[in-house]
Amino acid sequence: MRIVFVHPNYHSGGAEIAGNWPPAWVAYLTGHLRAAGYDDIHFIDAMTNHIDHGALRVKLAELQPDVVGVTAITPSIYEAEEVLRDAAEVVPNAVRVLGGVHATFMYRQVLTEAPWVDVIVRGEGEEIVVELMNAIAEGRWPADRKSIKGLAFHDGDEIVATPAASTVKDLEKINPDWSILEWEKYIYIPLGVRVAIPNMARGCPFTCSFCSQWKFWRDYRVRDPIAVVDEIEDLVDNHGVGFFILADEEPTINKKKFIQFCEELIARGLPERVQWGINTRVTDIYRDRDLLSFYRKAGLVHISLGTEAAAQMKLNQFNKETTVAQNKEAIRLLREADIFVEAQFIVGLDNETPETLEETYRMAWDWQPDLANWAMYTPWPFTPLFQELRDQVEVFDYSKYNFVTPIMKPKEMTRGRLLEGVLNNYRRFYMQKALFHYPWRGTGYRRRYLLGCLKAFLRAGVQRQFYDLGKTDYFSFKSRDELDFGFDMSRTIADAQMADWEASADKAARAAERREAVRAQMKERAAARACGGGSEQLSDDELEQADKAARPFRMPNGARPAAIREPAE
C-alpha cells in the first residue's frame, strides 16, 4: 500500500524568516508506520519547495497513492484542505486523511467546509494512524471506521467523532525516520547549518489561556534522556545537523531529566558538534539559576522566554504565573551565562493602545534581551481565551491566524496603526542593536550568531516576507488606518461547530457549578461543626468529591497554576 504525506505550501513571514524548518511530524509518523510494516511511504514538502497546486497534482498523478495524508496548524488549514481536494480529483480512489491541532478541535468546521476529506485523525497521530492504515490495507475501510478511536468523518449527513484515543504512553516505541526528509534544504540562517526539531517531551501541565498545546497533548510525558541523545547523535552523524530546537513547550519542567539530557550530551562530546535552543518559562530560569552555565556547557545557546506582556494586567489575563520584575531578572541571568535570550511579547488584545505598545518597547530595551519578538495575539478558536473574547472576534479567515496579522481590533486603534506600532518597535530595537551591540560585544561566536539573526531579519525585510507585508498594501501610499489585510470576510463558523461550542460551554458551566456546590456544602458543614452543632457525617462519595474539588493541582516542578480552566472541547 502506497502512502503519500504532504506538507502544505503555506507561508506567513513569521518563524520561517530564520530558516526552513523540517516538518518533524512526517518523520514521527513514518517511523511508526515503518515499524508496523509499511515501507512504501513518500513525502512531498510543498512548503519548503514552494510546490503549487498544479505541480502537486502532477506529482500525485505520478505516484498514484492509496492514501494521501496531510497535517495543518490553524493558518495552513485551507491549504491542507486544498491538497486533499487535489487528491480527490487526481487520485479519487485514495483515502484522504487530515490531522493536526486545528482539525482535532475544529473537525466539525473542517468537515463542513471540506466534505471531500474522508477522515480526520484527532489528537496524537502515531498509534491512530497505524490502526487506520491497517483497516485500509486489510479492506476494512470504511466499514470498521467507527471502531477506531480518535477519528472524525462524515456518515451520510451526520458528522461522527469516535471516542478519543489514549495518548501514547510509551514514547520510546516511537522512533522517527528522519531519512524521509531532504536535509540539505533545512538550514538555520543565523548559523548557516542544518536544523532539526526533535522532542524530549509531549504535553504541558500549564494552562495558559491563549495556548492549545496543553489541550492537544492532554497529559505531560517525558522521554528517556538517553534515547533523546541517541536520536540527536543520529541527526548529527547521519544527517549533518548542526543546530536543533527541542519542540517541547517547556523541556525544563522535569529538572532531573533535563540535567540528565545535558550530562549525556557532554559525555558524548556533542556540544562541540551541535548547538541547540529551547522555549521555556521564566520560573524555570529562576529555579535553575545556578545551573545555567552548565546548560551552556551542554551546547544550549538560545532560550526563548515567554515573557508575553509588559503590563502585569496582561500576564494575569494570559494565566501566566510570572511578574514583570521576574522577566527582567531571568533575562539578566541568561545573559550572564552567555546564553542568547529572546523575549516574546504578545500584543493586539482589545485593550492595546499606542501607550501599551510603547511600554513593551521600553521594557524590551530596559531588559536588554539579545532578541525581541512582538507577536500579534491570535485567538485560536479552541482555547479558553477565545471563548472569553469570541464576541469581539470579527475575522474568521484562519489563513491570517499566523501571529503576524492583527486579527483583533483594539478599541483605541485600527489594525493598521497596531501593525505600524509593532513594526516601529522592531525598527528601533534592532537598529540600536545592529549599531551599538551586535558587532562589538561578546565573543566571536556571539557576534557571528547575532549578526546571523540580523541577516535573517534584513533578508526577510528586503524580500517583503517579514510580517507578511508583501501580502498587504503596506507599501502603498494609503493611510495606515486604511490598510487592507486581505481578510476573506465570507469565512464564518459553521453551524455544526457553533453548536458543539455551545454544548461544551454548557457542560463546562455545569461542572463549575457542581464544584462550587460541593465547596459550599463543605463550608456549611464545617461551620456547623465549629459551632458545636451537627452530627451528620459526609459519605465516602461526598468526601471523595470534596477532596477532588478542594485539592490544589501541583505541577511537576512544584508550581501551582493560577487557574485551571475546563477545556472547551
Image: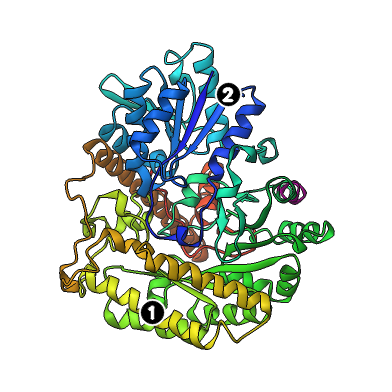
Q: Evaluate if marks 1 and 2 touch, with contact meaning CB atoms under 8 Å apart.
A: no
Residue at 20% in and 73% down: 480
Residue at 21% in and 55% down: 486
The reply to whether the magenta stretch includes residue 227 is: yes
Quadrant position of the N terminus in the picture? top right
Whether residue 568 is visible, yes or no, is: no
Residue at 38% in and 72% down: 314
- Disc 1 marks which residue? 427
User: 315 or 8, which is in the foreground?
Assistant: 8
Magenta segment main secondary structure? helix
Residue 359 marker = none
The reply to whether the magenta stretch includes residue 102 is: no
Residue 76 lies, with reference to residue 333, above or below; the image says above
Residue 40 marker = 2
Residue 191 in the image, given as x and y percentages of width and height: 61, 65
Label 2: element kind: loop
Residue 167 in the image, given as x and y percentages of width and height: 57, 38
Q: Amino acid at mark 2?
A: Asp
Segment colored magenta: 225-231
313 with respect to 490 (left or right): right
- Sort mark 2 into few (<14), some (14-19) or many (20+) by Cα contacts within 10 Å: few
Outermost right residue: 267
User: 311 or 462, which is in the foreground?
Assistant: 462
Residue 175 in the image, given as x and y percentages of width and height: 67, 37
Quadrant position of the C terminus in the picture? top left
Q: Amino acid at mark 1?
A: Arg
